[in-house]
Image (spheres, rainbow, N blue to C red):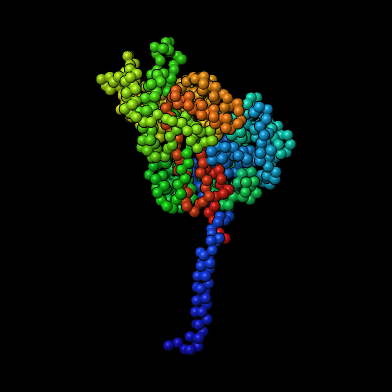
Amino acid sequence: MPPRSVLHSRWPIFGALVAGGLAVALFWYVVLANPSGEAVPASGGSYTEGVTRAPERMNPLFPGTNQTDADIAALVFSGLVRLGPDGTPQPDLAERWEITGNGQNYIFHLRRGVAWHDGESFDSEDVAFTFRAIADPAFKGDPALHELMQGVVVTARDPQTVEFRLEQTYAPFLAYMTVGILPAHLLRRLDANQLFNAPFNQRPVGTGPYRFDARTDDGVDLEANGTYHLGPPRISRFRFRVYGDAAQLASALRSGAIDGALFSDDAADSDVAFFEGDRRFTAHRLTATTHYMLYLKTSDPNASDAKTNAPPFSDHDVRQALLQSLDIDAIINDVAGGHGQRIDTGIPRQAWAYTEQALPPYDAGAAATALEKAGWARDSDGVRRKGAQRLEFTIAVADEPRQVAIAREVARQWEVAGVRANVQPYSPPSFVEEHLLPRQFDAALVAVAPGPDPDPYPFWHSSQTEPPGRNLSGFVDTRIDDALERARQTTDVARRRELYALFSGYWLTDLPAIPLFAPVHVYAQNTRVRGVGEGLLFTPSARFANVQEWYVNTRVE
């Protein structure tokens, strides 16, 4: 037995342990009993995003086909406006705007106190410099953006006001003002051609929620912009790490090497299903505005006798039966792993411009009956024939795995209905330049990218039936023309929605193409990442729309 003095000396230690335990218990009792003691977002921490391509030009004017460039630019730069979850333009560098002159003048009032990441003040000269560069004939960025700015006069009225004067009313103009603004004080000595390869593109300076910090061997590091005009980001550091392909990306997310990744068509369905089913991850399902449409050649202007040699798709009954004989939900499930949302005219269901429309339901029996009534009887080989014309044609498609798989499933289902569709893949450049643009196809499966505004004019107005217009079906309807023209000539959002509802009704009645579905991409993240918003993917970078609100740390208060 230890001496009495030793026993006596241990009692204070024992008492301290007991007291400490009681204190901890009391603390948790108070916290749990106090409803106001709850975890709230706290600043700090880091986030790592996995991507499959190294950055090349981190400049909002030149993302090209490099999605990583676009992603980084979305975090480093800001536009005059930003798009809300449904595509509604919202204030960004411009705190408000006025539209005057019958929709031809856009006057933007800029936020005061905005600074570039290098500390210089942002003003209207930066805006004017950026859009004059886009309008320059030597501009090497997005051709659609360049075309938009032709004839537009940009004037810096004063440091906080900039005006755009258009040659004619163009309601979608506001949605294109999301393009990131460049710093004139760093770049004004460069012309549009020199901007493309400027050293600036490797160490960009913007006004966005994150500032460029460093280029590493395996990616890029960004740090929070503490003076960001929409509020400092809660996450202190944002990293991009580059992996070889989608499979390596999935492996990195599983292992915890990264915190998040966007999985698109190139990802294995099994990997996506894993993240959707594992509680360690949050799987955000984000619907793309890009969608799959099967264009049908409804007329052949080169035919010597348009009536005698008309393609089978000129018959409305055939077009209707082709749609009704397709089980599009099955295509989504079997080919896209369930990651798709049905479309009707191509206007996204979550968009401000969408109005619910009734599509003919899948009914193979009704489709067969309609074809029989229209004179399309099955021949001895099972393919339908009307006189000397067989219901047989070729589906042209870009040689990309997902699109080819969709085309083949469509062809398989149509075979059951007595329609023979031969799938012909082409290299993507050949598909566009040699088949789509010159209208050298019977039917064509197209991934349609409508841009930031849902305006269907480029795809369905009669003025777009000739190359380089995108009315690929060659379809003409004066009622559709009228609705689309008027929608472009009003900046009243409610009125535009009404006109697009008219367009949709006319379009679905005539059905010049077969609407399929919009991909639903899975943005998988570790559950420690919270505050992430969900909206339409106008571009993949739209997943960062509310990045300043994301957080990985919490505190109790």
The outermost residue toward the right is 158
Hey, which quadrant is residue 510 in on the image? top left
Residue 394 drawn at (x, y percent): 37, 23
Q: Give the residue drawn at x 58%, y 55%.
A: 43
* Residue 509 vertical placement versus 76 (above, below): above
* Residue 6 vertical placement versus 38 (above, below): below
The answer to whether any part of residue 204 appears in the image is no
The outermost residue toward the left is 380
The outermost residue toward the top is 304
Residue 142 drawn at (x, y percent): 57, 31
Tell which of 190 and 523 is nearer to you. 523
Residue 463 drawn at (x, y percent): 54, 20
Hey, which quadrant is residue 273 in on the image? top left
Residue 383 drawn at (x, y percent): 30, 22
The outermost residue toward the bottom is 4
Q: Give the residue drawn at x 53%, y 58%.
A: 39
| Direction from residue 67 to residue 409 in the image, left or right | left
Tell which of 451 and 271 is nearer to you. 451
Hey, which quadrant is residue 490 in on the image? top right
For the C terminus, the quadrant is bottom right
Tell which of 548 and 492 is nearer to you. 492
The answer to whether any part of residue 97 appears in the image is yes
For the N terminus, the quadrant is bottom left
